[in-house]
Image (tube, rainbow, N blue to C red):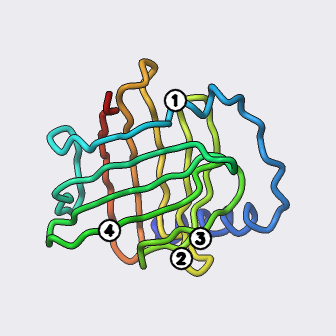
Amino acid sequence: MRRQIQSVILSAAFVVAATVPAHPQSPSKSDQDVVLGVWKVDLAQSRYYPGPPPLSETRTFTRDKGGIMGIVLRRNANGSEERIEYRADFDQEYPVSGTEAYDAVRFRRIDAYTSDAVLSHASRVFGTARRVISKDGRTMTITFRQEDPALVKNVVVYHKEP
C-alpha cells in the first residue's frame, strides 16, 4: 500500500510539473559546466539492486548552442549495447532516444552539484534519479529508483576522465 501511495504521489507531482508552464532557471554557465566531460562507471564502487550491473558505461556531457547534451554508452550484462541521448538542461521535459524503457526526462537543479530527474514513458513515471557531483568535480554519483513493475535501487559511481 505504501509503495502504491508513493507511486501515485510521484506520478501526480510529475503530471503537475509537466502541465504547469516552466520558467527555466538561469544557472550560470559555470554552474552547469561541472557536469561537462566524460564519466566512466566504477563498477567496484557501484551497487545495483537487483542487478546485474552493466559490463561498462560511459556518460558524456557536452555543451552545444541549445544547452547541455547527454549521451550514455552502455554495454549490458547480456552483451547488448545501448546509446541513449537526451538534453540535460533544467526545468523542461526533453525527449530521450535510444532506449525503450523511457522516452522523456525532466531535470531539476538543486544546486551547482546536485540535480534530480524524473524519467517517464508515455507520460507515466518510469523512475527517479539524483545526480550528485563531488565538490572537486571528479566523482559523480547517480542514485536511481524505480518502483513499478519491480523495485530497482541503483547507486552508481562515475569518475571523470582527465
For this view, does 23 lie left or right of residue 97?
right
For image coordinates 38% across by 56% down, the residue present is 72
Quarter of the image for residue 161 reads top left
Q: Secondary structure at mark 4?
A: strand
Quarter of the picture holding the C terminus:
top left
Quarter of the image for residue 74 reads bottom left
Marks 1 and 2, the one that precedes in the sequence: 1
Between the C-alphas of marks 1 and 2, the distance is 28 Å
Marks 3 and 4, the one that precedes in the sequence: 3
Front residue of 150/79: it is 79
Q: Secondary structure at mark 1?
A: loop
Between the C-alphas of marks 1 and 4, the distance is 25 Å
Between the C-alphas of marks 3 and 2, the distance is 15 Å
* Residue named by callout 2: 121
Label 1 environment density (alpha carbons within 10 Å; few <14, some 14–19, many ≥20): some
* Residue named by callout 3: 8
Label 3 environment density (alpha carbons within 10 Å; few <14, some 14–19, many ≥20): few
Q: Secondary structure at mark 3?
A: helix
Mark 1 or 2: the one toward you: 1
- Do tag 2 and tag 4 residues touch (Cβ < 8 Å)? no
For image coordinates 52% across by 29% down, the residue present is 34
Between the C-alphas of marks 3 and 4, the distance is 30 Å
Label 2 environment density (alpha carbons within 10 Å; few <14, some 14–19, many ≥20): some
Percent across and percent down for residue 26 are 77, 37
The amino acid type of the residue labelled 2 equals His
Label 4 environment density (alpha carbons within 10 Å; few <14, some 14–19, many ≥20): some
* Residue named by callout 1: 34
**Which mark, by number, is residue 82?**
4
Marks 1 and 3, the one that precedes in the sequence: 3
Between the C-alphas of marks 2 and 4, the distance is 17 Å
